[in-house]
Image (cartoon, grey):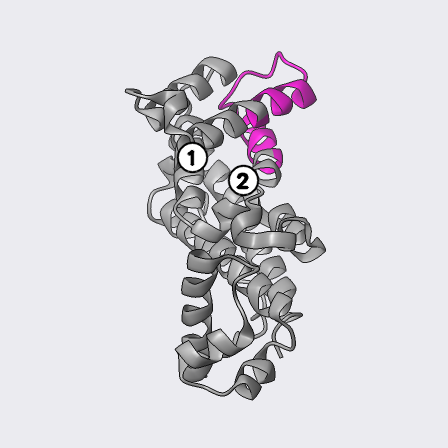
Amino acid sequence: MKPKTESPPAANPPALPESHSPKAARILASATELLLNRGFKGLTIADVAHKAYVGKGTVYLYWPTKEDLLIGLIGRDFLSTTDELIARLVADPDVARPSRFCPVMVSTARSRPLMTALHDHNDDVLGLLTTHPRAAALDAAIGPRATMRVALPSWRAHGMVRTDWDPEEQAMALTALTGGIMMSLVRPALSEGVDTLRVFAAAVTALLGENEVGEDQVRAAAADLIDFFRQGRSAIIETISSADT
């Protein structure tokens, strides 16, 4: 019987306010633009309300504090990253191969500016939010380190990578490689004249000893990753729902 690449959907998570409120959607869009342009310290709820054409009370109706609103913005970057990765894996299970998945994961995450700012500890943009417990919870749900701690055991179990290396040491090496690549993407001088993601794919293969496996193993690994991201998605929504009212 052909393995599935996706598991049944989990119970519906809480609905986010923008799903039923155009005002909430405008507030989020306005706050995102202001945060990226002015940073945490330069953003006020009054500015957000003015830009979104609502009263300050309307903003507070959905988000009781400035921190709640901005944690919600970061969480939505994580959420869109998760949704894109799930969609990629469902559409093409071959994305689950290590040399494909690692570059896809990194490039998808780096395309989200607030997620990137959190990973880079960018105080100019996020201020004290870089060390906020709820921001840490978002990263713990589907951040690169959390993802690799699920992906690597799956690849090992399905015969896709070498297993003659202590798994903890292998995970540490892969995490270090991933962190270095992510740093080089925001500091072009570190990789001038080099296709960073192509190098990353080759480095993953060199590090893990990627094996040729059949379709069943690839689909099983894709299913593991999809399950992980779906669970992470629920955790993200729970985290940002605690900030939304």
| Of the pair 135 and 192, the residue shown nearer to us | 192
User: As displayed, is residue 182 above or below residue 36?
Assistant: above
Q: Which element is circle 2 on? A: loop
Q: Is residue 2 visible?
A: no
On whether residue 238 falls in the magenta region, the answer is no
Q: Which residues are magenta?
A: 149-175
**Residue 61: x percent and y percent?**
59, 85
**Residue 20: x percent and y percent?**
45, 83
What's the mark number on residue 120? 2
- Residue at 62% in and 25% down: 171
- Rendered-image quadrant of the C terminus: bottom right
- Residue at 62% in and 49% down: 130
- Residue type highlighted by circle 2: Asp
Q: Which element is circle 1 on? A: helix
On whether residue 156 falls in the magenta region, the answer is yes
| Of the pair 209 and 158, the residue shown nearer to us | 209
Q: Residues within 10 Å of mark 2 (few under 14, many from 20)?
A: few
- Residue at 65% in and 77% down: 64
Q: Earlier in the sequence, mark 2 or mark 1?
A: 2
Separation of disc 2 and disc 1 at Cα?
Answer: 9 Å
What's the mark number on residue 1? none
What's the mark number on residue 186? 1
Q: Residues within 10 Å of mark 1 (few under 14, many from 20)?
A: few
The answer to whether the residues at label 2 and label 1 have Cβ atoms under 8 Å apart is: yes
Instruction: Report the residue that reaches farthest toward the left.
Output: 193
| Of the pair 180 and 200, the residue shown nearer to us | 180
Q: Is residue 48 visible?
A: yes
- Residue type highlighted by circle 1: Val
